[in-house]
Image (spheres, rainbow, N blue to C red):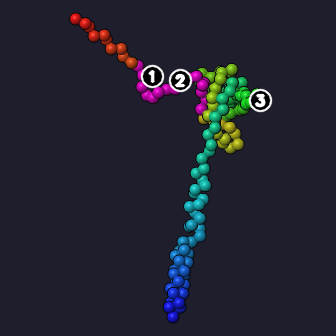
């Protein structure tokens, strides 16, 4: 008799679990899965080399990897200033619509801006007068 009651109680628990699982329609449950795939981040990469050609919309650099010279062409998001042919540059880029798109182009030796106030300036303290 006890075995029959335990089996019936277990069957009721299993049926209750199925009824709670079936509460959400399938379309509503899958809606969240589609949103998660839309937020895929693109990988940011970088390359450095010598400028071969530059225009307001594109830049070509020549870089050498293990002795092999390679020319890479990038579309520019924003026009660059102070970069001319034969300058060494470092480019941060990503792949957008099958094209290499440069988000930042900079000379490797250029000093970075340290914020709003610019470079720190130290004031010299006057020497104390000895009496």
Q: Position of residue 76 (x, y in %)?
A: 64, 33
| Quadrant of the rendered image containing residue 65 | top right
In the image, which is nearer the foreground, mark 2 or mark 3? Answer: 3
Who is closer to the viewer here, 119 or 82?
A: 119
Question: Label for residue 68?
Answer: 3
Q: Is residue 131 above or below residue 47?
A: above
Q: Judge whether residue 116 is colored magenta.
A: yes
Check disc 1 and report the residue beneath it. 119
- Residue at the location (66% across, 32% down)? 47
The reply to whether dot 2 and dot 3 touch (C-beta < 8 Å) is no
Residue range in magenta is 104-121
Q: Label 2: which residue? A: 111
Q: Residue at x 62, y 44 (%)?
A: 42
Q: What is the x, y in percent for residue 21?
A: 54, 74
Residue at the farthest top position: 131
Callouts 1 and 2 close, C-beta under 8 Å: yes
In the rendered structure, find residue 28 and report the number of the disc placed on it: none
Q: Residues within 10 Å of mark 1 (few under 14, many from 20)?
A: few
Q: Quadrant of the C terminus?
A: top left
């Amino acid at each position: 008799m006890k075995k029959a009651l335990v089996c019936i109680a277990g069957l009721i628990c299993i049926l209750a679990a199925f009824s709670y699982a079936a509460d959400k329609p399938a379309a509503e449950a899958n809606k969240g899965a589609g949103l998660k795939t839309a937020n895929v981040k693109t990988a940011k990469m970088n390359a450095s080399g010598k400028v071969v050609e530059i225009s307001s919309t594109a830049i070509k650099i020549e870089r050498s990897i293990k002795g092999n010279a390679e020319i890479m062409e990038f579309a520019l998001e924003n026009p660059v200033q102070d970069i001319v042919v034969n300058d060494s540059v470092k480019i941060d880029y990503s792949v957008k619509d099958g094209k290499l798109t440069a988000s930042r182009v900079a000379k490797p030796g250029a000093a970075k801006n340290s914020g709003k106030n610019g470079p720190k300036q130290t004031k010299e303290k006057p020497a104390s007068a000895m009496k």
